[in-house]
Amino acid sequence: MISPILNLQGTDAAVSTASTVGSASLVRVYNNNGTAVLLTVTTAAAATTTVTIAPGEVLYLEKSPLSTITAATSCRMVSVGY
């Protein structure tokens, strides 16, 4: 698989509490934990979607700038763009 070319839009940080990740539309999430972590994306209208990220996995989440991401256990997140 060919990796996309990404531009960093912010600083990589540990996130566990609800965050817009700098009002990002596209977020790179890295699970630096030894166990799977549940991520919850919450829209401005309070609708939620969840996804589980495996240990060591990298996931790219597209969201609205006002939506927040919460991780059950701290994961590394950064705003990215193409």
Image (cartoon, helix red, strand yellow):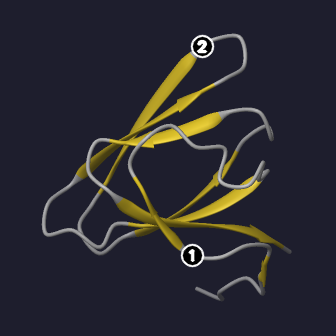
Q: Residue at x 37, y 62 (%)?
A: 75
Residue 14 horizontal side relative to residue 52, left or right = right
Q: Is residue 12 above or below residue 40?
A: below
Q: Secondary structure at mark 2?
A: loop
- Residue 74, quarter of the rendered image: bottom left
Query: Which residue bears the numbered disc 2?
Result: 47
**Real-space Cα separation, disc 1 to disc 2, in angstroms:** 26 Å
Q: Mark 1 or 2 closer to N-term?
A: 1
Query: Which residue bears the numbered disc 1?
Result: 12
Residue type, mark 2 in image = Ala
Percent of width and height locating residue 63: 72, 41
Q: Residue furthest left?
A: 34
Q: Secondary structure at mark 1?
A: loop
Q: Is residue 74 above or below residue 32?
A: above
Q: Is residue 72 above or below residue 82?
A: above
Residue 79 horizontal side relative to residue 51, left or right = right
Percent of width and height locating residue 25: 79, 50
Q: Residue at x 69, y 33 (%)?
A: 67
Residue type, mark 1 in image = Asp
Q: Is residue 77 above or below residue 38?
A: below
Do the residues bearing badges 1 and 2 touch, measured as CB atoms within 8 Å? Answer: no
